[in-house]
Image (cartoon, helix red, strand yellow):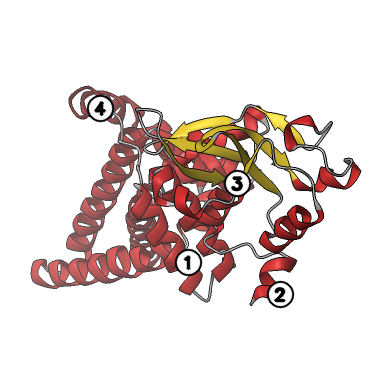
Amino acid sequence: MEYLVSIILVLLSGLFSGLTLGLLSLDVQLLRRRAKRGDAEAKKVLPLRQKGNLLLTTLLLGNVTVNTTLSIYLGSIASGVVAGITATILIVLFGEIIPQAVVSRYALWFGSRTVWFTKIVIFIFYPVSWPIAKVLDYFLGHEMPTVYSHHDIMDIVSELEDSVYSHIDEDEERIVHGALQFSHLQVREIMTPANEVVSFDENQKLTEEFFEEVADHGYSRLPIFSGNKENIVGVLFVKDLIIEDENISIKNTEEAFEPGCLSVKGEDKLDGVLARMLRQQKHLAIVKNKNGKFLGVVTLEDIIEEIIQQEIEDEDDVDED
């Protein structure tokens, strides 16, 4: 009978110790996200884990009570020195080290299957643990949420991509990194400079030579200027030229020329420019400085390439290569 009681007390000590480390190591935000996705184990553990100070106080009280009882009980059935050594070995090895090592690796699985036990313990120690937990809540406040910076998230994704236990692949890693970085870039960093922009005067005739030149450049949209190249007045849609009459000027076309264009500043951030492009359904924007000087152009494709961290190549690009 003495051995049975001792084994039960050691098991309880290990259970309290393991649950203390395991449950409190679970991140509340992670549990909440998993619960929203329908994870049954997270749904069971979340209500207990959200009350962090109450859970901590209860489990520690239970652990101390069991360990004290074990020491006293062993002292009643053995000599003082033997009881002290035996209690120390049992508590350290089977009541602390082994259960904490095991439960910490399977905290959610183990915690979800012992929710009933934890609730019973909270009920038993509630008159003592609740006031202590409230004092901790008052002076320490509730747990601070885990906040990750852009670089933290990028490092986490990279570590997951390198891990054999993760399904994140290299393409997903590259895209996530690009999506987290592109909002910090300015338009001037990715735009096509003014001296490299292919543009035409609004009075340019739709001649055979013009069509050949447009085809050689391979762009789907071209800025159109009036008088000088810095005075951009609209955009030419190359695909619509096929329905236009020959030998008329660009500004007189029915469908191909669209007056007006989206204008952005060189210091504008890419995320803001992307939002404007999507809202106004524009694929090309004219870049100007604060004085209105023409600096270049930026396209929707340029921004997408920054997000996916890879150049988008069409048939014309492949042919040129």
Question: Disc 1 or disc 3, which is closer to the eye?
Answer: 3
Q: Residue 160 carries which label?
A: 1
Q: Quadrant of residue 9?
A: bottom left
Instruction: Tell me which residue sits at (70%, 58%) in the image.
Output: 213
Question: Which class describes the residues within 10 Å of circle 4: few (<14), some (14-19), or many (20+)?
Answer: few
Question: In the rendered image of this protein, does residue 30 appear above or below residue 119?
Answer: below
- Secondary structure found at label 4: loop
Is residue 287 toward the left or the right of residue 21 in the image? Answer: right
Residue 208 position in % (x across, y down)? 81, 55
Question: In the rendered image of this protein, does residue 126 appear above or below residue 188?
Answer: above
Q: Do the residues labelled 4 and 3 touch (CB within 8 Å)?
A: no
Identify which residue, 217 or 161, lies in the foreground. Answer: 217
Residue 52 position in % (x across, y down)? 35, 37
Q: Mark 2 points at which residue?
A: 319
Question: Disc 4 or disc 2, which is closer to the eye?
Answer: 2
* Badge 1 or badge 3: first in the primary sequence: 1
Q: Name the residue under label 4.
A: 141
| Mark pair 1, 3: CA separation | 46 Å
* Badge 4 or badge 3: first in the primary sequence: 4
